[in-house]
Image (spheres, helix red, strand yellow):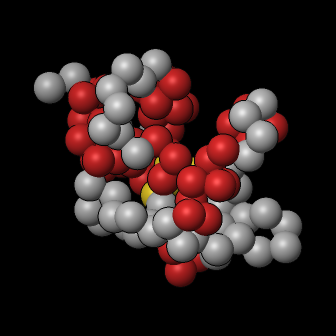
Amino acid sequence: MNFYERVYEIVRRIPEGKVMSYGRIAALAGNPRMARQVGWALHSLSEDDVPWHRVVRKDGSVAERLSSASGGLQQELLQAEGVEFDLSGRILKEYFCQEV
């Protein structure tokens, strides 16, 4: 299984209503210094069953490209799952999971 496949498998296991950071996924995939590659893996996603929207920055913010270019699609998808954001647009820490 290559790195991208490991990333997809981990992201599929993130429970609904929870999020995980790019860096945490990289660590769980066996390469803790490859957070940026997690982003590339999700960017090149061709499968519909990977809940990409549950992957966020470690500070709880969503990627600008996803929040501005798509009209806030990632935030909308997360809010539909019950994830709450603070006034600055960051996800509350209680919605982060460390293990899947």
Residue 5: percent from left, percent from top: 24, 29
In the orientation shown, which residue stands out farthest toward the right? 88
Specify the quadrant of the image occupied by residue 63.
top right
Give the answer, above or below, for where 93 lies relative to 44: below
Specify the quadrant of the image occupied by residue 29.
top left
Residue 99: percent from left, percent from top: 30, 65
User: How many numbered marks are there?
Assistant: 0
Is any atom of residue 30 visible in this view? no
**Image quadrant occupied by the C terminus:** bottom left
Front-most of 62 and 24? Answer: 62
In the orientation shown, which residue stands out farthest toward the front? 80
In the image: residue 65, left or right of residue 51? right
- Tell me the residue at 50%/38% (across/down): 35
Is any atom of residue 6 visible in this view? yes
Front-most of 79 and 7? Answer: 79
Specify the quadrant of the image occupied by residue 80.
bottom right
Front-most of 39 and 26? Answer: 39
In the image: residue 62, left or right of residue 48? right
- Tell me the residue at 34%/64% (across/down): 15
Residue 61: percent from left, percent from top: 70, 55
- Tell me the residue at 85%/73% (across/down): 87
Give the answer, above or below, for where 19 lies relative to 95: above
Give the answer, above or below, for where 40 lies relative to 15: above
- Tell me the residue at 59%/76% (across/down): 93
In the image: residue 42, left or right of residue 100? right
In the orientation shown, which residue stands out farthest toward the left? 1
**Image quadrant occupied by the N terminus:** top left
In the image: residue 45, left or right of residue 10? right
